[in-house]
Amino acid sequence: MGKKYKGVGELSEAVTEGWLLFEQATGDPDRFDILASSSYRVAARKGELIRMKRLSILLAVAAMAASLTAQTAVQSGTAKPTKVAKAKSASPWVGTWKMDVPNSQLHMPLKAETVIITAASNKRLVYHGSMMDDKGKTQGFHYTGMLGKDAPSYMGGKESGKESWKMTDANTLSTEQEAKDGAKTTGDCNLTDDGKTMTCKWHTAPKSGDGWDEVYVMHKQ
């Protein structure tokens, strides 16, 4: 049966697992056998407790196998070039949009409006901008919200109401809005396939009285 030394059993189990890893990675188990037999001889000759942990041995074997596999691939010319991840293209909604006032249908007259969308995905929408009324008065506005959830909107530095948006498809954003005075607005913004024109159609229902429809035509700058 032969004399057994304390610690050799642990080394045996670790080496067996290491051999399987090495064979799978390199397809050359004979090279590992040389290393394994050398380790056995050292352990048996000294008769000392082997204190190396199983995990340390397996990690060392795996690293050695990976290194040898990489070297073999380079030498044989089969190594694949490293792929560099491409940056994701910006959403077609993102950008600066200016209103085409003559071709828009407005409830309240405007001289100009600019909307700057900085984020538009299936998770969130972020925009800010400014509008100028027919008397030349300019007000800024901004909104940041997660899609499908209400978030406050601001006009002139003050909270003006709440908005909720959702992306029904790649070219359509739908919204439900409620102003501080109780007026509710619903509608869709549709993007042309070339990403150059956005048309928003709104219907607003005030707390009392008749509602109205509007069409905003915006061009990307």
Image (spheres, rainbow, N blue to C red):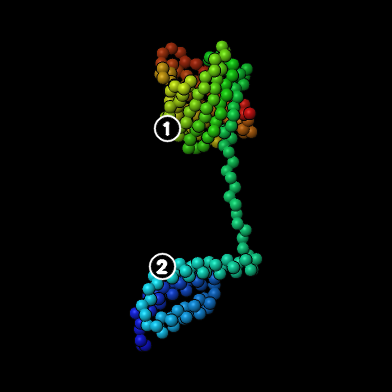
Residue hosting label 2:
55
Looking at the image, residue 199 lies above or below residue 3: above
Q: How many marks?
A: 2
Residue denoted by label 1: 149
Viewer-side label of 2, 1: 2
Residue at 43% from the left image edge and 27% from the top image edge: 152
Residue 139 left/right relative to 11 = right
Q: Amino acid at mark 2?
A: Leu
Q: Position of residue 23 (x, y in %)?
A: 51, 72
- The answer for how far apart the CA atoms under marks 2 and 1 are is 48 Å
- Is residue 217 visible in the rendered image? The answer is no
Q: Nearer the viewer, residue 186 or 48?
A: 48
Q: Is residue 16 above or below residue 146?
A: below
Q: Quadrant of the N terminus?
A: bottom left
Mark 2 vs 1: CB contact within 8 A: no
In the rendering, at what x and y percent does residue 44 appear?
Answer: 40, 83
Q: Which amino acid lies under the numbered mark 1 shown in the image of this protein? A: Lys
Q: Secondary structure at mark 2?
A: helix
Residue in the picture at 56% in, 69% down: 68
Query: Helix or strand or loop: what does disc 1 sit on?
Result: loop
Q: Position of residue 193 (x, y in %)?
A: 62, 33
The quadrant in which the C terminus is found is: top right
- Work out which residue is located at the far bottom of the displayed protein and give it: 1
Q: Name which residue lies at 59% across and 19% down.
A: 112
